[in-house]
Image (spheres, grey):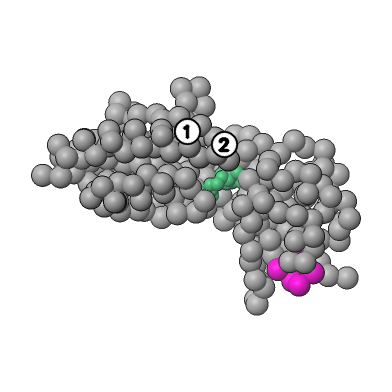
Amino acid sequence: MQGKISGVSLGPGEPELITLKALKALQEADIIYCPGTQTKSRSRDILQALPISMKEVRLFHVPMSKDRTLANQTYDAICTEIAALVSTGKNIAITAEGDSGFYSSVNYMFDKLTSMGFPITTIAGVPAFIAAGAISGLHIVKQEEKLVVLPGIVTAEELDSLLTSGHVVVIMKLSQCTDEIHRFMQANRQHEFHYYENVGTLSELHETDKRSILNRTFPYFSLMIIQPHII
Ligand code: SAH
């Protein structure tokens, strides 16, 4: 009998923000695959705070680079390992931080395993920007406003065009576009800038003061929500 594979979304960091369905899938899994290294894994930090056994958690380290060759080789090796386990009837969970369908590179593995004949059931999770809105009591988009999410590839001109036409903008992967964000903020102080770091963890930060935001080095787990103020 073939086992099952679940793509389990863990939410942004706060263990209580996992769904009941995701927790159940983790509890039913024989082996849990989790991105990270021995010293650093946001996903493992979440797992450790949940009522599950950590015995069968296997960490995998995915090299981060624009060139995906090395990352894909890592994923290919794990897929081969998972395929062998599932064939012997093991249930596998593959975790992803936030929501697994939202800018998550584990989808490479989901696609690969599906094409190998091992279908994945994915379980929805709370994306980081939604949790960010909640910790700051933000009504992220109201009435007829439109929301645009940008994955760290952005120019000051693009931001200007989106905000002056009334869009609310979420910028993920801020560390990839620090200079452009600075350029935009310096020239457009009228908008409302909400900057977040490590939402749902002990080092969580929400900052709206423009000078303080400009003085920070944006870490990997940071994002911004900009609400338009048109004058
Ligand atoms: N699947 C995730 C997004 C992964 S892309 C989700 O649903 O949210 C990684 C980017 O997400 C980071 O660069 C950062 O911009 C954002 N992010 C993820 N978790 C975060 C957190 N806890 N706090 C702030 N930003 C976070």
Residue located at (70% from left, 68% from top): 167
Q: Quadrant of residue 78?
A: top left
Label 2 belongs to which residue? 65
Q: Is residue 72 left or right of residue 219?
A: left
Q: Residue at x 63, y 66 (%)?
A: 147
As displayed, is residue 30 above or below residue 20? above
Gap between marks 1 and 2 measured at Cα: 8 Å
SS at badge 2: loop
State which quadrant residue 164 falls in. bottom right
Q: What is the magenta segment's predominant secondary structure?
A: loop
Q: Residues within 10 Å of mark 1 (few under 14, many from 20)?
A: few
User: Identity of the amino acid at label 1?
Assistant: Leu
Residue underneath mark 1:
70
**Quadrant position of the C terminus in the picture:** bottom right
Seen at 45% across and 54% down, the residue is 101
Q: Which residues are magenta?
A: 163-167
Q: Residues within 10 Å of mark 2 (few under 14, many from 20)?
A: few
Q: Residue at x 68, y 43 (%)?
A: 176
Q: In the rendering, at what x and y percent does residue 173 appear? A: 63, 45
Q: Along the line of sight, which residue is nearer the eye, 199 or 161?
A: 161
* Mark 1–mark 2 CB contact (< 8 Å): yes
